[in-house]
Amino acid sequence: MNLNDSIQNITVAIIGAGFAGLRAAQRFEQLGINYMIFEGSDRVGGRVFPFSYQSGYLQYGAEYVNGEDNEIYETVKKNNLLSATEIDEEGYETVVYGQEVNNKMYKIWDKFESSTNEKLERDGARKEVKNQSVSERIDFYFSDFMKAQKLSQSEQTVMQNMNKLFKNQYQLEWSAPSTDLCLRNFDTWDSGVDSEATLNEIGFKSILDELASKVPKTKIGMSSKVVNVDYTGTKVKIMLSNGQYFLFDSVIITASLGYLKKHKTTLFTPALSVSKSAAIDRFGFGNNMKIFLEYNDPWWPNGMSTIQISGRVGNTETSNSLEDDLMVFQPFLWARKILVAWVAGNGPLEASKLTDSQLMTVLDNHLDTNLKNVYIVSKIQRIHRHSWISDEFALGSYSYISNKSCQSNTDDIKLMRDPILTNRRPVICFAGEHTDSEMFQTVVGAARSGLREADRIANYYSLL
């Protein structure tokens, strides 16, 4: 790209130092464009949040890398970050109402699950059903499947609980309620490969450090919360929560979709267009949580990959509680004393209301009560977690195509991504994982979006 005086004299504000903001900044460094990042929290990385544990790093946020034809995966290969050990997909233990699911039930269920996964993928492209939810479609197939089975009442109960676990898998994978996860996600989202990369004990710490190293710390304003972006004048005015303000030619907004949903009416002056605001409201933004349970020694057997629990022992309540969403537990590949609770549905909100001590008590009781006929479960020594739903700059986990987005028959990702122009000048640009049309809800999508918007600004000014 040929630079001229116009491009070297402009100033750009980047709001947010997650992967979208850092990648945009890296591009501006390459092009010699003046910029400043405003990060509301006290750290960089956004929803990539590694924390030190023993000889490596556990990840509060993003943990896997999607696709292979992208810069993030190139960094993974270059830095030898792929895990040498893969998860044993056969090492499952499923417990329903405190009893192990036997091989007979597993064989029946596997037949249903494998065929239904394939059907759901196809349904995402079928005009007559693609606007239905995953939950609705699974129940449709499950009803037909059960009619063809000759099962006792107790066996039917097992299968019904297996179906709950099946829906929960989609909730965890997509960070979305299965009742609001539109089938169109399967046809829209595309990483180019069928699997995701599992990283080693360094993982995203190395990826984040490499990207952040290319952005001078002097160009990142930490704990700098932007409360208003005023684009009524010839310059864009950025107002901070401490009363300071700065003027820029263009701005890249990389705030999470959850943040935009909550603050869009006060964040922009003048207000966003009706169509962009409606797209932000419609598009889904889900909530997941990982709770790392640390023990003195592992009580689960070697080779165990996943423990699933459904149908709580002794539960007489008709309403849902936190325990109903404590369904999936996985031993960690390299941290042998860690068991990870993957929590979806209403669980992250309920867990965020509890202290660590209270949550440990709930988890200890839940595991002991439901697994006592299978394992001798020891006490949790400590837990590690981050509540994304209560994180003021995230307010959730990742985006997805919701039922409302499907039913609107609009391209909400494009509406959210489209810049605000003044006489063709990109005044306000929008980046973030929710603006990538193929790999929304991923770190790859976030990074690509930052590069996309940096190039949008650079291309405009280079032509002046």
Image (spheres, grey):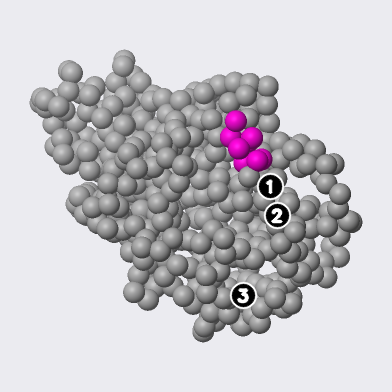
Q: What residue type is labelled 2?
A: Lys
Disc 2 designates what residue?
Answer: 107
Image x and y of residue 96, in percent: 75, 64
Q: What stretch is highlighted in magenta?
A: 115-122
Q: What residue type is labelled 1?
A: Lys
- Please determine whether, in this image, residue 9 is positioned above or below residue 80: above
| Relative horizontal placement of residue 452, taking residue 181 as reference (left or right) | left
Magenta stretch holds residue 33 = no
Q: Are marks 3 and 1 in contact (CB under 8 Å)?
A: no
Mark 3, residue position: 360
In the rendered structure, which amino acid carries the disc numbered 3?
Met
Q: Quadrant of the C terminus?
A: top left
Q: Is residue 38 visible?
A: no
Query: Is residue 128 in view from this perspective?
Result: yes
Closer to the chain start, of discs 2 and 3, is 2
Question: Between marks 2 and 1, how big is the CA–CA gap?
Answer: 6 Å
Q: Residue at x 44, y 30 (%)?
A: 437
Residue 163 picture location, percent across and down: 73, 50
Residue 423 falls in which quadrant of the image? top left
- If the image is split into quadrants, where does the N terminus sit? top left
**Contact between labelled residues 1 and 2, with CB atoms less than 8 Å apart:** yes
Seen at 55% across and 69% down, the residue is 304
Task: From the image, tell me which residue sits under label 1.
Answer: 111
Tag nearer the camera, 3 or 1? 1
Q: Residue at x 45, y 67 (%)?
A: 333
- Looking at the image, residue 51 sits to the left or right of residue 215; the answer is right
Tell me the SS state at disc 1.
Answer: helix
Spatial CA span between label 2 and label 3:
35 Å
Q: In this view, does 191 lie to the left or right of 173?
A: left
Q: Residue furthest top?
A: 423
Q: How crowded is mark 3: few (under 14 residues within 10 Å), some or many (20 or more)?
A: some
